[in-house]
Amino acid sequence: MRYYYLLFILMLTGTHVFSQQVSVKGTVTGPDKAPVPGVTVLVSGTRTGTTTMANGQYAIQAKAGDTLVFQFIGFETEKVTVGTSPLINVQLSLSNQGLNEVVVLGYGSQRKRDVTAAISTIDVSKLRDVPAANVSRLLQGQAPGVTVKQNSGAPGREFSVVVRGLGSLGAGSRPLYIIDGFPVGTSVGQNLNPNDIATVTILKDAVSTAIYGARGSNGVVLITTKNAQEGKNSMMISANYGIQNIPESRKTKVLNGPDFAQFKKDIFMDKIRYFEHREPSLDEVPLDFRYPEQTKYSTNWYEEILQQNASFQDYNVTFSGGKGDIRSLVSLGYISQEGALINTSFKNYSVRANIGGKINSFINMGLNTNISYSKENAYITEGRDNLVGAALLLDPREPVYNEDGSYNSYIGGHDGVFGFFNPVQFLNEVERGDESGDILSSGFVEFSFLRHFKFKTALNARLKYDSYKQFVPSTIAGINAPPPRDASEADNSYRTINLASDQLLTYDNNFGQHHVDVLAGFTAQEETVKGIDGGGSQFPDDLTPYLSNATLKTVSTTEYSWSMIAFFGRLNYSFRDRYLFSATFRREGSSRFGSANRYGSFPAVSVGWRLSDEPFMPEMPWLNDLKLRASWGVTGNNDIGNYTSLPLMALNNYILNNNFVGGKVISAFANPELRWERSKQLDVGLDLSAFDGKLNFTAEYYNRITSDMLLPIQLPAIAGFTTTWSNVGKVRNRGVELGIDYRTRIGEVGFNGNFNISFNRNKVLEIQGANDEIWNGTMYGDYNVSKPGRPIGMIYGYKVLGIFQNQAEIDASPTQDGAIPGVYKYEDVNGDGVVSYDQTDMVEIGNPYPKFNWGLTLGADYKNFDLSVLLLGAQKYDLFRQIESSTMNLDGVFNVGVESKERWRSESNPGAGKIGTTNTWKWSRESNSRYIYDASHMWIKNVSLGYTIPKSTLGFSQVRLYLSTDNLFLITNYPGNNPDVDNNGGTNPGLDDEAYPVPRTFSIGANLSF
Amino acid sequence: MKPIIIITGLITCCWLLSCNKYLDKTDPTKVNADNFYKDQKEAEQALNGVYGQLQGIMNNQWMFNELPTDNTTIDFNPDDRGQADKIEAFEFYTVTAGSVNIRDMYTAYYNALYNINTTLERMEPASIPDSVKQEYQGQLQFLRAYYYFNLTQYFGDVILITKPIKQLSEAWEYLREPQEKVYAQIESDLKAAAASLPEKYDAAGTGRATKGAALGLLGKVYLTRKNYPEAVTTLQQILPLGYALLPSYADVFDPQKKNGLESLFEVQYQGGNDLGEWSSFIYTFAPRLSAGAVTGFAQSRPGGWNTPTKDMIAAYEPNDKRKDVSLKEGYTNGAGAWVPVPYINKYNHPHTIYTRTDDNWPVLRYADVLLMLAEAINEQSGPANAYGYLNEVRERAGLLPLSGLNQVTFRAAVLKERRVELAFENHRWFDLKRTKTPEELALFLNAYAAREKADPTVGRQGIPYSNSDYIFSSFEALYPIPTQERLVNDQLTQNQGYH
């Protein structure tokens, strides 16, 4: 004790006289008075820092007058000035961030606790370990009601995003993306670097989206990019390097060389047995597959086109200057992702500069600019005729290379096997590139006047350049067309100019317990795209892949544009923070609609009631906040082509007197009445915060009815056309969304968990009059059928009852013309005694919509380690595995899946009961229920483990290293590579025609800050 | 900062004032039909567009008019069965209402009729000299009649529409009309066309419908309706118009001699360039595995469709000069071996660019007129006055004149002559339907089918026929109304026998 006293005296003296460094110590506790370990304790303005130990104690050197900063995730940051006492005990309070944080809304922002709309905010900083080449990846599993699917594993591709179900049968169902206030359309594109994103807010209900009028129906994704932190200059470097591979369990398996030869041999012999009722002699089998065991080669083509250990690289440097009146942030990014298929890749280079600040006491300004260039080297891979599908179908008895090392450039094409290009050669020799240069800039000036008013004028501009070039050399075979063939080239380039301007006037004031803020605005936007498409064929050689060398050339130019203008307003009113009211209105005109219906109005209102503040509520110490809210409003969807309401004429020329004469015909049925789709959406929600903010819970119910759908309705052919765009029908999406967030700390271990689950039910209420079925599809694909009473685009086909075992069974069943034993027995749905070879007897065989989607993020930290796991799932939905119409085509023209070994060969050898006979083609490949698979799945989407090197060790202010795996593990019974696949998308969902496979990524990364 | 406020304010005001203009967008690369058809030049372009639509229709007409008949079959592809329910169904008599080819054909016809009806209506108030207007109207009426004549022969009762649909709901108000009414419209259009069309155009108009074409088609309509007196008087009006048989049968199809003296109407094509107006019939018809042996381009993968049957080959009398022009019985492949797969040779001429041939398609020619006259006169009053017309055609083919026939045998002789003279010109299906009741047609085609089945023109590599193949029922004399049309409008009736 004496010792301490002495020290205290010395210290005091020292401080006074020399400002001597002294040791300050103490204990940090939480609200429950339990010690909190791992809290960062910093001496503000210096590089001195430490962390609390297991018992919450710390010790640090400081001077009197210094400020100690206590920081820890989940708690409010505390600042204490060092005074005379060497003992500073601190009790941290839990962060109320969830309630006091400000959230971004359309044309403004609002305190989260005052929000009466259904919105989800994603804190992107938590997702920094995810190897994301596209921004859309960051949305996956983060928000209830937002379904994000990776339809294709192609590098750099945007994921599909759907908010609260498909709202339209004919127009698009994709949300509107807004980057820093600039509506960029229904695609976020490939040019925004995920590292530059600060937050993403998803607007889901009408009161939040109606302010975007005719573009708000499908939800709005507001992306806010990073800005410099006030009062802080820093430099951050992040690096992430990974390798990608297709997991063995997710590869589609087909027969090897000898097995395929055996299969071909069996087909031949089985046919003789069946049709000629005798045992064939070996001599009758064509020599090519008479001795399967002597098959010379066995090539796994799928394996051959895969790129092993494809790299993923993401490097970013951010300079941020937050001191002074003008803050600036400059970010340099480079993302390079090789594809899972050889010679495919995506690269993006970006530079961002976000500058903003005060000009003087009443003028603020800001300018965000992103300059980006990306290059994608990918191919059309979907479907049997393209790369991945073809690799499954190729004759495995052929080698990739000839003996002399050159490509074996025509695979198959003899003995009744279809001829294909060599996909390895294709990937290596076909030149293809998509390039895109993009300048996206938004600037604003804001004036504050008369204390409560602000006027903001914003100008947004995008200049974009896209080009596409593909050269297929003469060495590449076609399907059943051996090389050399005519080389061909496509060379297209497009330029886009998108200009938008907003004028916003806001008023914000408190009158006693009344709070009012008002927004009035005007906006205009115009986008023009101009393009030139060139094509060439018949090149003298493959050496000069430029159109100028083509003998035959085609060229066409396009130009299209759209424009919109709108007035809008919003009123937010609250009384005692307890009764909340909000109303928005927008009146919008769009060039896309018929002259008779150019303008529309989009009103919305919402109310909120903070029950927890009511005096009548019993005192519940655990309850921090309880709010009920409801909203209703009207939004629109204008996502159809630009000129769909017009009767445009197409060229249709002729020859007279052996000379060319120009001719024109009408190319579409005009509909001047065409207008936007209208969605009326009701949303009821509850927000709850409890246990000192550790637990946050949100529940929503919504009911959205879209009417006047923009739909290409079927017309009787006598109208001149079989379809035209019209406003018909109604679709309802209703559902429930639950989100729960919990974070706590037990001893030295911190936990956080976020779970969200959404149930959406989609139903077509009406289409048009008596004509209320929309069929899309083909006999050997699937049919997607929309009809009242059922969801959009249900999968239709014949219902397989089994396999006909013998002629007696065929004779006893409804007539299937041409059926022989071994083919499928289909259900005669209409009971007319005939299974007709058209759609008449087809029924609903699959539902492509999950009963529910869920996402779970789990996080934990211990000392300097942190761990985060993202799980995603979708339950009970069907996919139509279209590729099987080729891989299970038993004609012997293609290689087939390994399941074919279990096919029906005779009544005594009926196989596994799933695959039929090879003796005929009919009644086997048609759209039927055997293609349907339950695609329910749980995906361990990402696991990341990080380690933060204690500050004192290195000169950096922070270094964090991490390991991350993406698409780690998939639990499903679905046989395809990817249960998220959706080849057609939109209103024709649920088709899997073998897309670009989705790889698993292992990556290692580091974040350094100075 | 004041300037910014002012500029912003000004911009805002400008936008406000020009809102509607700001929102007026039309495709700058295309003409809006609402602003078209104003003058002679535009009406002519619309008319040319209507002619242009003939090309698409003609590209597939063989499927409906030759393939089901005894004239042609298919070069069976055992490896790719993808066409089994599509093209092959026409050969094997397994066409259903779900046929995509029937649907596409039906749609193409009514799309062409929509353009015809629109052009006729919109041209009416346009400032075009009367004489020109009438000439244009005549051509449009000729084409409208041609389409309806085909439609009613394919489907029987069809929807008759002579005005463009403007309101969506109108499209559901039209139902199938009795064939009588359709024929009344066809006759009225053709009479009007025959009255207003010139006998001949100046050179630049070569290829447009003429008076002769209208009379020829009208004669065929009368013949089909068994109105023989009208058929004879109508067809006889063509005789003084200057048409004649070309001395050489091959010249009729020679692209170098398009639109010759014998031609009343043909669909125009042009190959050898980038203008997009080429034909490519030989690529559809040449044997499947012939590669370049027929087309002259090694990279060819011909369709092997519309293959002349053994029956057809046998139908030629010895020394008929037409046989070698119309068909070949096989080809020599790249390895120098003779492959006995026959093919249609009429539309096979040297061309300079792969898949772009220069061959026109004959629709109406003078030989057809002569044979129709022979048929009509024989039906009206027996063969006595009909021999001349028949024998004129035979003589050009290097065959001896016929004589001493009675009405029945003469009828058979004309039908046989039409078969070989007009082979593969899409006449056979309608000729058979015209001269036989559906029951007779069924007997006739089943007999042919039995021969073809017993001894296929092209081998099937051991693959047996389906049980349903080659069973022709009398109801199949009409094609089915496409399922899709009946889904869209459930008031639309189906032809008996189909569902």
Image (spheres, coloured by chain):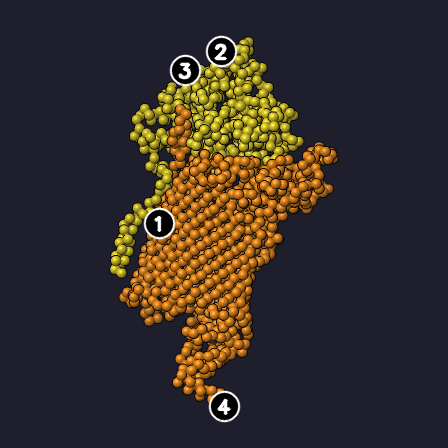
Picture residue at 49% right of the left edge, 11% below the top: B388
Residue A368 visible in rendering = yes
Q: CA distance from mark 1 to mark 3?
A: 62 Å
Disc 1 with disc 3 on a shared chain: no
Q: Which residue is mark 2?
A: B388
- Same chain for labels 3 and 2? Say yes or no: yes
Separation of marks 4 and 1 at Cα, in angstroms: 79 Å
The amino acid sitting under disc 2 is Gly
Q: Earlier in the sequence, mark 3 or mark 2?
A: 3
Residue A543 location, x and y as percent?
Answer: 49, 39
Chain ID at mark 1: A
Look at label 4 and name its amino acid.
Arg
Between label 3 and label 2, give the one nearer the viewer. Answer: 3
Q: Quadrant of the N terminus of chain B?
A: bottom left
Which residue is the site of mark 3?
A: B242
Tint of chain A = orange
Task: Please state which of the two labelled residues, at mark 1 or mark 3, is closer to the viewer.
Answer: 1
Q: Which residue is mark 1?
A: A526
Q: Is label 2 or label 4 in front?
A: 4
Q: Are marks 1 and 3 in contact (CB under 8 Å)?
A: no
Instruction: Decide: few, some or many residues near mark 4? Use Cα within 10 Å; few <14, some 14-19, many ≥20.
Output: few
Q: Quadrant of the C terminus of chain B?
A: top right
The reply to whether discs 1 and 2 touch (Cβ–Cβ < 8 Å) is no
| Nearest-to-viewer mark from 4 and 1 | 4
Residue drawn 46% across the image and 20% down it: B365
Q: Mark on residue A2?
A: 4
Dot 3: chain letter: B
Determine whether the residue tagged by mark 1 lies in a helix, strand or loop: strand
Q: Secondary structure at mark 3?
A: loop
Q: Residues within 10 Å of mark 1 (few under 14, many from 20)?
A: some
Q: Position of residue A802 (x, y in %)?
A: 65, 44
